[in-house]
Image (spheres, helix red, strand yellow):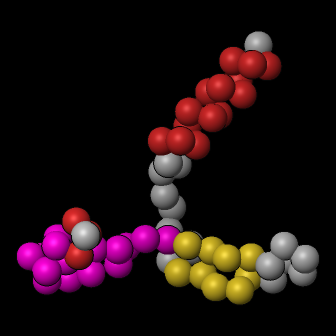
Amino acid sequence: MCALLIQLVVGKPVLADISSVVVDADTGLVVQAKNADIKRQPASLTKMMTAYMLFDAI
């Protein structure tokens, strides 16, 4: 609901700059890709899990 409200106020799609890649696990073929080549920062959860695994290994 909030994203829809922001989209109505701003006038452009809120999720337009999102990157995504969908890969078939059996064949390894890319089924769908949107902005797949754009360099992105990892999500916060990814950073937390990386730190968790690092400290677990230590």
The residue under the point 73% across, 82% down is 30
Q: Which residue is most to the front?
A: 1
Above or below residue 16? Residue 1 is above
- Numbered circles on residues, count: 0
Query: Over which residues does the magenta segment extend?
Result: 5-19
Above or below residue 33? Residue 2 is above
Choose between 52 and 40: the one closer to the eye.
Answer: 52
Which quarter of the figure has residue 3? Answer: bottom left
Left or right: residue 12 versus residue 15 is: left
Q: Picture coordinates of residue 36 (x, y %)?
A: 57, 74
Left or right: residue 5 versus residue 43 is: left
Q: Is residue 11 magenta?
A: yes
Q: Picture coordinates of residue 15 (x, y %)?
A: 35, 74
Q: Picture coordinates of residue 53 (x, y %)?
A: 72, 28
The residue under the point 55% across, 73% down is 20
**Quadrant (top left, top right, bottom left, bottom right) of the C terminus:** top right
Left or right: residue 11 versus residue 55 is: left
Q: Is residue 9 magenta?
A: yes
